[in-house]
Structure formats: structure tokens, C-alpha cells
Image (spheres, rainbow, N blue to C red):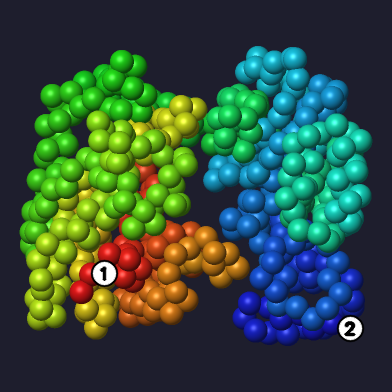
Amino acid sequence: MIRITFPDNTVQEFEEGVTGLDIARSISNRLAKEVLSVSVDGVVWDVHRPIYHDAKIKLYTWDDEEGKHAFWHSSAHLMAEALEELYPGIKFGIGPSIDQGFYYDVDPGDRAITDADLPGIEEKMQEIVARKEAFQREEVPKEKAMEYYQDKGDQYKVELIRELEDGEISFYTNGNFTDLCRGPHLPNTGYIKAVKLLGVAGAYWRGDEHNKQMTRIYGITFPKKKMLDEYLQMLEEARKRDHRKLGKQLELFSFSQKVGSGLPLWLPKGAALRERLENFLKQIQKEYGYQQVISPHIGQKELYETSGHYAKYGKDSFQPIKTPDENEEFLLKPMNCPHHCEIYRHTQYSYKDLPVRFAEFGTVYRYEQSGELHGLTRVRGFTQDDAHIFCRPDQLKEEFKKVMDIILKIFEALEFDTYTVQASLRDPDKKDEYIGSDENWEKSEKAILETVEETGIEAKIEYGEAAFYGPKLDFMVKDALGREWQLGTIQVDYNLPERFDLE
């Protein structure tokens, strides 16, 4: 017998080899029909995978992100099986679940897959759904996994496997399709009741424009047809409310290829609207003791080397600007933080002068691949209402709470009634991806979590979502169509003050 501990800390004994599905069935038949995945000691598993040891578990349904992830990731494999049947010899990249649905990057060879082909792929997917094919997990040594894909001639999977650590690697098979995958997956394809492929786009392999451009196919699935109908209706409403369309109709902004992709031009009406919003925000900042500053649009490369931004993003950002002086290199400003650190350094402060609060509507520039640009939501140049507070450690929580007050005040004024809060922390297993000492990170994260607890705001903890120099509290709002957007971030940073020798 093994002991299973539930989220409420109740404990129940089961036979070894029990599955999440069995456990759900022991609670109710309805739950057994709805459960899609299970967390076993903090790791999300297939709901039909046997458990042979004492474990803490949590069952996930469609109402949980983890449940949707298993559903949509399984749907990506369903689509891949359909593609392999329809396009023999097709090669596969990656096929993850995303916020709404899934995609798969594929290389169809000399053939092209277009939007016109999607209905036929959907029809094949429905055939496979009707077969109720099981998703079967198998763990194999790395060498065997490599051999399988070398024999198949799938160079993309070979590349992925080569980078994995030695040891057992999991495969999943549904029907005649086998894929390299950690899971989790549904018990079988029959869970997927409604299928819609949404479009085809180009995507460079692994996001590198020097690699081959693959075909990315987007789709979405649901456990009920009614859900799909409602989603398609929402998409139709979204098309009517597309900000790119409204921006053109209302003469707010435009884009010019001569100016450059992803660089919006604000027309007179848009500039007036933007000025009104800025004035509203500046008034709130003034009430809370912020001083307005202005920093240049470029900075010396050394500035971003000191901050750590160049080491982190230099390869993927706009390349340095050369000057007639061969010893000089400048970068377009990707963020305001280093500039504000230097503004602080200009004056010698007493500890009694703190906190010092700087605010700026600073325009920053970040290189985005052309295929990722989208209206005003993904651009190469944008303006942030950005602020930096320089304070003593004993003032941190009070200042943090005031920024939370500012964000919620703005949300109320703009009628963002529905919002969620996320504490974005460092991934403890990938510390080398972040700068700074463990001590600084522990202080920063502790400050955020304690402040959230003291204010009574409910925040979801997400590991691995922190900025490379510090943890943050993210505020997400929902628009008129229920889509979620990040619209407000508070970061705690012990690292930049050290790197810039601020005292």
C-alpha cells in the first residue's frame, strides 16, 4: 500500500500502481470524467500514469492551467499524427501548448502547407479522435532516442536530444506517431471533442533567423463543441476590436516601411490621446513624490556591460552604433534602469534624503524579429512610464506598498476591474541565468512575499519568471474579450545598485 496526501493534508491509502484517474474515481465519477492531469510531489504527470510511492498529489481539470496544458499539448501531438499521415516524410520541431491552444513547427520539405490545407488536416484529426488512440509513455536511454530519430532522418529532434543530459528520455506514442516529450498527456485522443486550426505562419527554427524557416501551424481544441463555438465568437469580436484596425480608422497611429517595421508613428489625434494619458499618470506620480527625469535614447556600450544587460541581451538586440571615434560604441537604449542609476550617482545623498523617486516616460528600443511584430503590442520602439526608487532596506516594504497603491489607483480609473497578481521569482534550479548573490535574491524575494502577505492581496507564485537581476510582482488585467495582459510590474533590485556602486 502507498499513502496519498491530498491538498487539504488528508491522507488515504491506495494499492501500488494507482493512477490519478483511479484516485479521482474514488472521489466521484464526475471528477474521473473531468480530471486531465495530476501533480505528483510537485511534478505534473499523466493522469493515467501509475504511482508506486507515497506522494502528495493534486488533481487538475479544465479549470486549471495544468489541465489545459495537458489537453492542448496532447492536441499538438494529435495534429502531428495527422500531418504525418497526410505528408509522409514531414519533419517536426517543437509543439508546445500556449496560453490559448497550441502550435507545432514543422518542415514539410518541398511542399507548402497553407491556410487552404487546414480543413483537410482538421478532418484527419477528427478521424484520429474517433479512434480514441491511447497516449503511451516510454522511457528510453539517450542513445536509443538518438538512434530512433537518426534512422527517421529528423534532424530537428536529433539536435534537441543532443543537448539533453545523459539518462532516460521519455517518448510518447499515439497511433503511428512517436514524439520526444516530457508530457503530460491525456489518456487518449477521445477526450478532444472540438478541433479548430487557426492559421499558418513562418517561424525560424529555435527563433534564430539564421536557421531554416519552418511552418508553424496554430490550433485550439476543447472538451466540448459549445466551448469552441464560444471561442470562435470571441475571435470574431476580437477582429472587430483589433487595435490595428481601430488605430487606422480613428487616425491614432500608423506604420511606415520607410521608417522601419515595429516603429509606430503617432498621428495628431493619437498624440493628443497619449499626452492626456501621460498627464494623468504624471499627476499621480507627483502626488506620490516622484521627480520627472529625462534620459537620452542611446548610451555607451560600457553602461549596459555594467548593468549586465549587454551580456544577457547583446546578441539579440540592436547592434552597436559606431562613431568616427574607433574607441566609441553606443547602443539604442533597451531600458531606462542604467540611466537612472547614473542620474542618482550625480548627487551625494544622506540616508536621511531617502527615498529618492525618479520617473520618466522613457522610449526604449528592442529588436524583435519581423514575424513577431504585432501592432502596438509587439514593437521595436515603445515608451514606458518607468520609475526607480532608491531607498534604504528598512523603507522597502513601505515603498513597495505605495507602488501597489499607484497601480490599483490607475486600474480603477481605467476601469480594469478584473486583475490577477503574480509573484515572479528566480528558478532555483537555474541560478546561473541570473546575476547577483543568493543572499540578495533571498532578501528580494522575501521582501516581495512578505509585502504581498501583509497587504492581503492574493498572488500566484511563478518560479523562473523573474527578471535576470531581480524578482518582481506582476499585475495582469483582462480586456473586454477576457484576454489577459501584463500591465504593471514592481521589481526589487539589490544587484544594480551594487554593480553601479551606488551609495
The residue under label 1 is 501
Q: Which mark is residue 470?
A: none
Report the amino acid beneath label 2.
Answer: Met
Identified at 73% across, 45% down, the residue is 160
1 or 2: tag closer to the N-terminus: 2
Q: Is residue 43 left or right of residue 397?
A: right
Q: Is residue 221 left or right of residue 294?
A: right
Quadrant housing residue 132: top right
Identified at 35% across, 34% down, the residue is 380
Indicate the position of residue 184 as horizontal and vertical percent values: 74, 55
Identified at 38% across, 36% down, the residue is 318
Please, what secondary structure does the residue beneath circle 2 have? Answer: loop
Indicate the position of residue 136 as horizontal and vertical percent values: 87, 51
Quadrant housing residue 194: top right
The residue under label 2 is 1
Asked whether residue 138 is in view, the answer is no
Mark 2 burial class by Cα count in 10 Å: few <14, some 14-19, many 20+: few
Which quadrant, please, contains the N terminus?
A: bottom right
**Nearest to viewer (mark 1 / mark 2):** 1
Which quadrant, please, contains the C terminus?
A: bottom left
Taking depth in this image into account, of 373 and 293 the one nearest to the observer is 293
Please, what secondary structure does the residue beneath circle 1 have? Answer: loop
- Residue 384, above or below 232: below
- Residue 225, above or below 421: above
Quadrant housing residue 221: top right
Identified at 54% across, 36% down, the residue is 231
Taking depth in this image into account, of 308 and 326 the one nearest to the observer is 326
Taking depth in this image into account, of 366 and 14 the one nearest to the observer is 366
Asked whether residue 306 is in view, the answer is yes
Indicate the position of residue 212 as horizontal and vertical percent values: 65, 26
